[in-house]
């Protein structure tokens, strides 16, 4: 089916000024526009782990497979350039499934000017697996890494957290534009995208940076979906717990010099709110400060692969 | 297990001069050394299709997953630069399996100076699937495409064909060095790597180039394994049939101007033999010419995905 599928796809791929050679040869050929640097990231999404094919529109699954990679490039403050996509498809209905996955990817690729440069489309006796590799370019400000947070930096997040399982894990906005705007206008020290849980990804960021962090739990922006989930949970986890540990929010978590953060928060330059939720500290580890001022260790929670 | 696995892997990754930021951030950062062009290819290998995990050393599987991508970059006459690897691992014994797969990849990556730049390592209830994306650079001679064959060009191949299932499909040498030498020293018009079958990949090359081809079947270099397989087959397919249709030879099939080809064949500049097996013609389609001079249509055979 791969030959027919490539024919189907080539009719739907818009030209891209930086894609010199697209699907149909042994490799694709891209041209970089500026700096001789390339960002590259890969995410593999599998049935019953990252989505349930039996319950979900394949277009939403396809969209998510590209969007999670866009979020990784956003976390590096890069410009997405091109994706290659490998599919392992169950044999029954493989062609139709492949086209629907791409119907979910194509609009998002167009929105972010991502060239779908190539792929590998296979059938097998296993469940659906989708691997997307995304290439990006750095801006003249260079990449934004996990390792740059310094004690005293403000901890700033985009958007709100928790309950993404109710739908947002499919339909989230990868913060590509937001990251580029912030990186252009402000001095930022570090960033990570919250894919596995706010507290868990915060732990990764401080671990990379060799510092610690204190989070003011009453300042964490809690998504409506987190409150809805807490109500339906029967009390096993409150809304804050969902916000700190659910994952798949795909919001940005930033380390920003405090004076810069004050200006950024006052200016609110994005369509999505920026919120100060804590600060980075010298002592390694995570702490939570309650509304009453009590300080307790924060155990990172989230999705462990 | 991903955190432990990344820790294991980082201890085994040699530094690479063009890998500015390796595994451990949201994306890897690479620096291109020369031209602002990037080759990118992806291959997804799955259990019971491309290998049998139950019967094979995972190290050979890991090696193959990288080698098939090296072969694609070779077909474009590119220099491999960096790979990102996505694994979907069965839950039982996932860590051990992941390390063995990488133990097969690491020596090949070192041999071809490929940076293992990043990856995504997941467990699931499905069988093993391995997606490798390989980035490469073009040389100052530019890329070599499938589409450049012209009527009158000689059809030249590296190595021999058929019977790779007896072992060579794991242990083949991707023709990276060979392609770079040939592309540097001679004018080449087109190339493809024979992954799915000599006749099938030839059909793809002429289809991309808008021409046809005549193959002298008595000149096709037949691998010993193809003869062994034909003998054990009980006559269902002869050795030539295996050479024309088995696939996974990962040899180069080249279109070369006839005068250049004469020089190339006389000089034999590679450690592996170069053989003239036919010519490209104006009329679309494939023909085979027997030892007696009879011309018949050649039906492409090979592995259809």
Image (spheres, coloured by chain):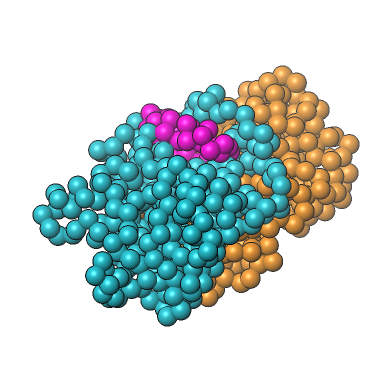
Chain colours: A orange, B cyan
| Residue in the foreground of this view, choosing between A218 and A282 | A282
Looking at the image, residue A125 sits to the left or right of residue A192; the answer is: left
Quarter of the image where one finds residue B198: bottom left
- A196 relative to B5, above or below: below
Looking at the image, residue B247 sits to the left or right of residue B176; the answer is: left
Query: Which residue: 89% across, 36% down?
Result: A259
Looking at the image, residue B215 sits to the left or right of residue A163; the answer is: left
Residue B156, position as x, y percentages in the image: 43, 59
Magenta span contains residue B34: no
Residue B184 visible to the viewer: yes
* Image quadrant occupied by the N terminus of chain A: bottom left
Residue A86, position as x, y percentages in the image: 46, 55
The outermost residue toward the bottom is B283
Residue B73, position as x, y percentages in the image: 53, 51
Residue A165 visible to the viewer: no
Quarter of the image where one finds residue A94: bottom left
Magenta span contains residue B99: yes
| Residue in the foreground of this view, choosing between B165 and A196 | B165
The outermost residue toward the left is B234
Q: Specify the segment rendered in magenta.
A: B95-124
Quarter of the image where one finds residue B234: bottom left
Query: Which residue: 75% across, 31% down?
Result: A149
Residue B88, position as x, y percentages in the image: 41, 43
Query: Which residue: 87% across, 40% down?
Result: A260
| Residue in the foreground of this view, choosing between B152 and A92 | B152
């Amino acid at each position: 089916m791969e030959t027919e599928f490539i024919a189907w796809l080539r009719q739907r791929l818009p030209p891209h000024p930086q894609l010199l050679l697209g699907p149909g040869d042994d490799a694709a050929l891209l041209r970089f526009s500026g700096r001789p640097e390339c960002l590259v990231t890969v995410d593999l999404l599998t049935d019953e782990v990252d989505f349930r094919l039996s319950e979900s529109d394949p277009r939403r699954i396809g969209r998510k497979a590209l969007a999670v990679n866009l979020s990784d490039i956003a976390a590096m403050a890069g410009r997405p350039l091109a994706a290659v996509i490998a599919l392992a498809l169950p044999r029954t209905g493989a062609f139709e499934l492949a086209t629907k996955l791409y119907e979910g990817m194509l609009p998002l690729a167009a929105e972010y000017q991502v060239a779908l440069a190539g792929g590998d489309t296979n059938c097998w006796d296993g469940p659906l697996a989708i691997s997307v590799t995304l290439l990006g370019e750095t801006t003249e400000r260079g990449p934004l890494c996990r390792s740059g947070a310094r004690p005293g930096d403000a901890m700033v997040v985009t958007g709100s957290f928790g309950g993404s399982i109710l739908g947002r894990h499919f339909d989230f906005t990868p913060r590509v534009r937001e990251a580029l705007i912030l990186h252009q206008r402000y001095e930022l020290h570090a960033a990570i995208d919250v894919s596995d849980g706010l507290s868990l990804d915060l732990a990764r960021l401080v671990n990379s940076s060799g510092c610690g962090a204190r989070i003011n739990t009453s300042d964490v922006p809690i998504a409506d979906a987190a409150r809805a989930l807490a109500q339906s949970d029967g009390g096993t986890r409150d809304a804050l717990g969902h916000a700190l540990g659910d994952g798949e929010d795909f919001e940005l978590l930033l380390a920003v010099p405090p004076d810069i953060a004050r200006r950024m928060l006052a200016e609110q330059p994005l369509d999505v709110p920026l919120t100060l939720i804590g600060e980075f500290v010298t002592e390694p580890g995570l702490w939570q400060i309650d509304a009453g001022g009590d300080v307790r260790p924060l155990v990172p929670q989230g999705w462990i692969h």
